[in-house]
Image (tube, rainbow, N blue to C red):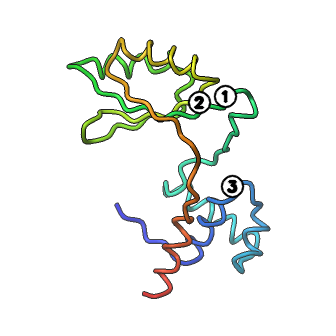
Amino acid sequence: MKIVLDHYDYNILELLNDNARLSYAEIGRLIGLSQSAAKERVISLVDRGVIKKFGIEVDYSLIGYSLPVLIHLKFRNDDFKIFLNQLQQFPEITSCKRVTGEYCLVAEAVLKDNSHLEHLIDRLIRYGIPSTAIRLSEVGMPNFFTLHKSKLKKS
């Protein structure tokens, strides 16, 4: 079911996407609504499932995990299902997505160093064929809601 959002909703999503800790008062002030109206709209976005969760972004390098890695995994037969059932055995994997194409899964991991990467690869080989790439940097992407909001104004 497609949910229709208005410009206030997009403004709220844009703000929360950049800083999920904003108060209702601050959101209201920034988009021209009262604190209570901003709160009602945020709650409505949550209740309708548009906002799934509020989260944090961790700088893993500050806690000793300075090697961010992308892992592409190919599997043989049912090894895919076995791996998914064992995913909790890989705490260094921070996200895992099922994809189409040459690989079955793309995962992100944070590791301490190259030795840690080698150890992770050795553990992954039991389940499938890993291909890894070290992430050099994050590319700054524009906020999805900022771009969508500008299209909304043109409509």
Q: Compute the Cα span from label 3 to label 1.
A: 24 Å
In the picture, the quarter occupied by the C terminus is bottom left
Instruction: Residue 142 in the image: state x and y as whole percent.
Output: 56, 65
Element type where label 3 sits in the image = loop
Q: Look at 46% across and 35% down and name the residue there.
A: 133
Q: Nearer the viewer, residue 3 or 118?
A: 118
Mark 1 element type: loop
Q: Find disc 1 in the rendering and name its residue.
A: 65
Tag 3: amino acid: Ala
- Measure how far apart labels 2 and 1 are at the Cα level: 6 Å
The answer to whether mark 2 and mark 1 are in CB contact below 8 A is yes
Q: Nearer the viewer, residue 53 or 76?
A: 76
Please state which amino acid type lies under the numbered disc 2: Val
Q: Which mark is residue 148?
A: none
Image x and y of residue 68, in percent: 57, 34
Q: Amino acid at mark 1?
A: Tyr
Q: Residue furthest bottom?
A: 154
Q: CA distance from mark 3 to mark 2?
A: 23 Å
Residue 96 location, x and y as percent? 44, 34
Q: Please report the residue visible at 73 percent of the width from the left and 72 percent of the height from the top.
A: 28
Does dot 2 land on a helix, a strand or a loop? strand
Assess disc 2: are there few (<14), some (14-19) or many (≥20) residues with their C-alpha within 10 Å of its C-alpha.
many
Indicate whether 65 appears above or below 54: above
Quadrant housing the N terminus? bottom left
Q: Which mark is nearer the camera, 3 or 1?
A: 1
Q: Quadrant of residue 65?
A: top right
Earlier residue among tags 3 and 1: 3
Query: Circle 2 sits on which residue?
Result: 110
Answer with mark 2 or mark 1, whichever residue precedes in sequence. Answer: 1
Few, some or many C-alpha atoms within 10 Å of disc 1 (few <14, some 14-19, many ≥20)? some
**Residue 13, placed above or below residue 73:** below
Q: Which residue is mark 3?
A: 20
